[in-house]
Amino acid sequence: MYGLPKNANNHNSGIGLPPPVISEMIIKLSNKAMEKYNGIIGKTYSIEEVSKHNKKDDCWIIVNNKVYDMTEYLLYHPGGPNLLFKCAGRDATDDFEGMFHSRNAKAILERFYIGKASSSTSILLSPNYKPPPSFSSSSSSSSLKPFLVPSTSSSSASSSNTTITLSTVTTPKNRNKIIVSKVKINKKIKSTGNTYHYFIEIPEEHKDLEWISPLSHVSLAKFNNEDTTNFNNHDNITFKSYTPIKLTNDKKYLEFLIKGYENGDVSKHIHQLKEGDHLLLKGPIQTADNFNFKKQENYLLMIAGGTGITPMIQIILESFYNKNDNNNNNNNNNNNNNNNNNNNNNNNNNNNLKFILIYSSNNENDIIYKNELDEILKQFKDRLFIHYVITKPCNNINNNDNSVESFKKGRINQDMILTCLEPIIIKLIPKMITDSMETLVCGPIDFNQSISKELLKIGFKDNQIHILQ
């Protein structure tokens, strides 16, 4: 299933380190992408030439004076296409190094090498450079604002955790950091099947960072007990991105919903851990820079597959409870929730926003967070519409579970999406449906691609479909 890149040895200079591994799928993808460069790999390109390749169907980047054609890899980027695409046509060295990539990631990058840049990696952007539009935008749409390049990494430490600051991005409103720290699993509670709630501590000195803000995520990795301080030696660390759904009221812990996979290196390791064990945490990281949640006014369509529900839960909780209600006892806190919602209404520009959630799972037993979603639905039934979809119904359906009867069955397609939108269609002029909402899609790569195609058939435009990876 796994193979090595032709130049894998370049990434295996460390004594005793195993060679990097790359999936057969990525190897085939890169081989196909490199066919058009046969005979010219290694060519020197000017900065002006590279800057012209800043489209979603023609995406070049520069890393450490090397030029890479990442077009075919965009949709397969673990952090989502936008994190990669916002570097299109420019020097992405600081961005790449600042995101703490593993040896495997560096080996994958080398598979898409096409040549050399003619100038130093410290050069500024060409005067003729125009930043690319967001990945989901059409080429005629307005451009994405230039990405602010992270500053040089710095280090910090506390008595309870060892932390380094990977990068700092300065914005007009605040100063956000991406940090890597040793963190502890405070609590582990089974949710459904092989999915668990994990409450993971936040480094004391970084509680004020934007850990929960639509849309943000963190990355988790195995913690090596034999090396508690040298996080800078990160070449052999494999991170996996996860979306925290809530922040506890005391701001001490992030709550995650994590499903274990037998072939998942990180998730399998996490599921073997117990309360009190440690992980490496990297974050917070913005998931979709091109999606402005605060500008949503009427409806937001959210389509999730499996664990892709977590960023949707994050948005729902943020919208209705304003980062609060981590208490599982909803019955005792309904009054508090309503009060919090009223307070939120005074401060949230999109307090009238309605959410249509289409949530697909393998079967009714695999639906993550269903009880909690149903409780939220009871409280906000005028603003939240949920459609559960199951692709492989269980044979032993619980006869007492009347909700199973209302599940939609099969794969999500154009007709099913339109059926879920019927209450909205009645209220809107049909030709204006797609102009009244944007969509968030999150799930496996094949799921995301399939849903995007179905949405395009309905009439949604590229810049209204935001893929979360």
Image (tube, rainbow, N blue to C red):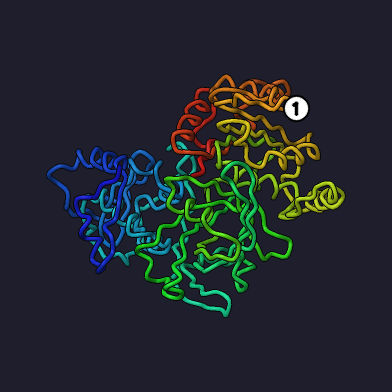
Count numbered badges in the picture.
Answer: 1
Task: Report the amino acid beneath label 1.
Answer: Asn
At label 1, counting other C-alpha atoms closer than 10 Å, the crowd grade (few under 14, some 14-19, many 20 or more) is few
The x and y percentages for residue 206 are 60, 70
Q: Quadrant of residue 436?
A: top right
> Residue 156 versus residue 403: which sits nearer the camera?
403
> Residue 106 versus residue 327: which sits nearer the camera?
327
The x and y percentages for residue 143 are 47, 46
Residue that appears at 72% across and 43% down: 372
Single out the residue that lies furthest toward the left.
Answer: 39
Q: Secondary structure at mark 1?
A: loop
> Residue 19 versus residue 192: which sits nearer the camera?
192
Whether residue 134 sits left or right of residue 24 in the image: it is right
Single out the residue that lies furthest toward the bottom.
Answer: 159
Single out the residue that lies furthest toward the front.
Answer: 396
Q: Quadrant of residue 29?
A: top left
Above-or-below relation of 443 to 426: below
Above-or-below relation of 291 to 374: below
Whether residue 244 sits left or right of residue 447 in the image: it is right
Residue that appears at 73% across and 28% down: 401
Residue that appears at 63% across and 41% down: 368
> Quadrant of the image for the N terminus?
top left
Whether residue 263 sits left or right of residue 169 in the image: it is left
Residue that appears at 48% across and 72% down: 164
Whether residue 18 sits left or right of residue 306 in the image: it is left
The x and y percentages for residue 74 are 38, 43
| Residue annotated with mark 1 | 400
> Residue 437 versus residue 207: which sits nearer the camera?
207
